[in-house]
Image: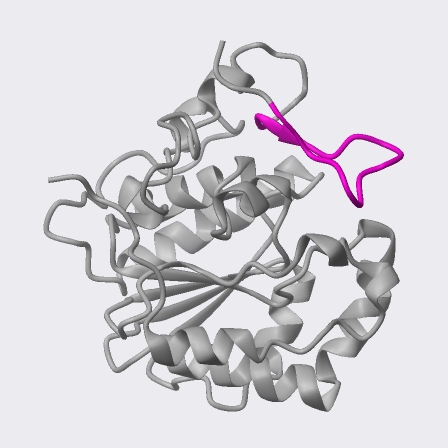
Amino acid sequence: MAEFDRGPTDAFAELFARVPDPPDTQAFWFDWGPIFYRGRLDGSARVLIVASDPGPTERIAARTLVGDAGQRVQGFLGKLGLTRSYVCLNAWAYAVHPSDAEEMKDRLADSAQLHWRNQVFSSAVGLQLQAVVAMGFMAQEAVRLWDGRPQQAVLSKVPHPSSHDPVALLNGWRAAVTTLRAIVTPDDDGDNTGPNYGDTFEESDYRPVPRRDLPFGVPAFLGDDAWVRAKGTGQPTSVSRPSPDDGHTLIWKARD
């Protein structure tokens, strides 16, 4: 049977539709619209991943964390033995210009943003939640502001998957995997006894985004950029924002 994400429930769709505009639209790739989630929204998630904001591949997929960073996150979840019992959300539903990120971190506390985001976070998780993993400074601030965070869930703060400091990234993720393996219950078809991270980030540390996390009908290569990384060009995914018209143009290259 084909697996695919059937989309949010009516209740979540109504909540997502109420996403407030960013406080400064010029600081975001605003015209591309918001991206909301990936994974389970039914309260079955054992791990909540919070990252910062969606990128260009996420816009194509209409799901978050599906590009190079998302495939690193999928590898992280795989090391915990999770194949489905997770949900991924962001501090911002709109993509933030990196040069504006520090300033926008302070705007996470704006009342409209805070109320909506906390409602999304709280609605997406249930009593089965065992851990919240906040990836990067933006996510960590959003989680700090989440007054409804379930207290039974351990909070793990780690670098963002796109961190430009590979040593800090690997050290942080390696330590988190060690800690969380003792806390998070693996899925029945998962394995949390495999290798942890080494001294360099390897292709084996990536995992493709499962088809069950993506809308029906997307091409088979979406969510698996191993073929792009193998070229060694420094281009991490098949989707890019061309300068100077990155606010209105995306380039998406199909598998060779």
* Residue 254 on image: x %, y %: 51, 19
- Horizontal relation, residue 73 to residue 98: left or right: left
With respect to residue 132, does 97 lie above or below? above
In the rendered picture of this protein, how many numbered marks are placed on residues? 0
Query: What residue is at 19 percent from the left and 55 percent from the top?
Result: 186
242 drawn magenta:
yes
Residue at the spot x=46%, y=31% of the render? Answer: 198
Q: Quadrant of residue 150?
A: bottom left
24 left or right, relative to 154: right
Q: Answer whether residue 49 is magenta in the image.
A: no
Q: Quadrant of the N terminus?
A: top left
Its colouring scheme is one colour
Majority secondary structure in the magenta region: loop
Residue 63 in picture, x, y percent from top left: 47, 52
Q: Residue at left 69%, top 34%?
A: 250
Q: Which residues are magenta?
A: 237-252
Residue at 50% from the left image edge and 52% from the top image edge? 64
In the rendered structure, the answer to whether residue 229 lies left or right of residue 177 reads right
The spot of residue 44 in percent (x, y) is 23, 70
